[in-house]
Image: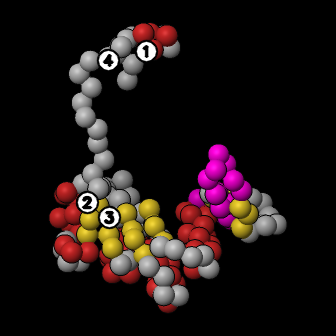
Amino acid sequence: CQDEVERIDQRVRNETWRGIELIHIQVASKGPRATLEFDWQCARDAARRPGVCLVLGYNGAVFLTWLRLKRRKIFTNMDGIEWRRPKWGMAARTWFWLNEWIGAWASHRLVADHPAIADHLATRRPRSAIATIAYGADPVTSAPEAPVRALGLEPGRYL
């Protein structure tokens, strides 16, 4: 969990919530700089813990090199193809492209959430290094309406 604070008084703090270990990491920055500081501190902390490092997203993949130096096993869910999105300026798009490339090569295994993402990643790594775990669910064709109506909503009209 990223905790943005004015002054760091406890860089890493563990807490248990409903049986789940939460690791809070304090950063004293704001905006994109806070994200980079958080990613770096997460990599440093993960390098000291046992087990496989499951990385969700590649925007801070430059820090995966630290985990490799520490001989950690890294699995990365590579998200989408952020660097292609027109909403980002050239500097951000370059950063995302570089980190996608670094993430693809620094990770032992890549996870794609869609076959098209797996196809894209296959231009960077062999298919044997890529697993696809697609999001999704079976279509709901009929369901009880009472729970939806109890919320003051009309079935099929609340989006």
Instruction: State the separation of the CA atoms marked 2 and 1.
Output: 33 Å
Q: Which residues are magenta?
A: 15-31
Q: Are marks 4 and 1 in contact (CB under 8 Å)?
A: no
Magenta stretch encompasses residue 16? yes
Question: CB of mark 3 within 8 Å of CB of mark 2?
Answer: yes
Image point 25% across, 60% down: which residue?
132
Q: Which residue is mark 2?
A: 132
How far is mark 4 from mark 1, CA to CA?
10 Å
Instruction: Please give left or right for residue 146 compared with residue 119 in the image.
Output: right
SS assignment at label 2: strand
Identified by mark 3, the residue type is: Val
Q: Dot 1 lies on which element?
A: helix
Q: For the image shown, how many numbered marks are present on the structure?
A: 4
Closer to the observer: label 4 or label 1? 4
Find residue 25 and report its image quarter.
bottom right
Say which label, 1 or 3, has the lower sequence index. 3
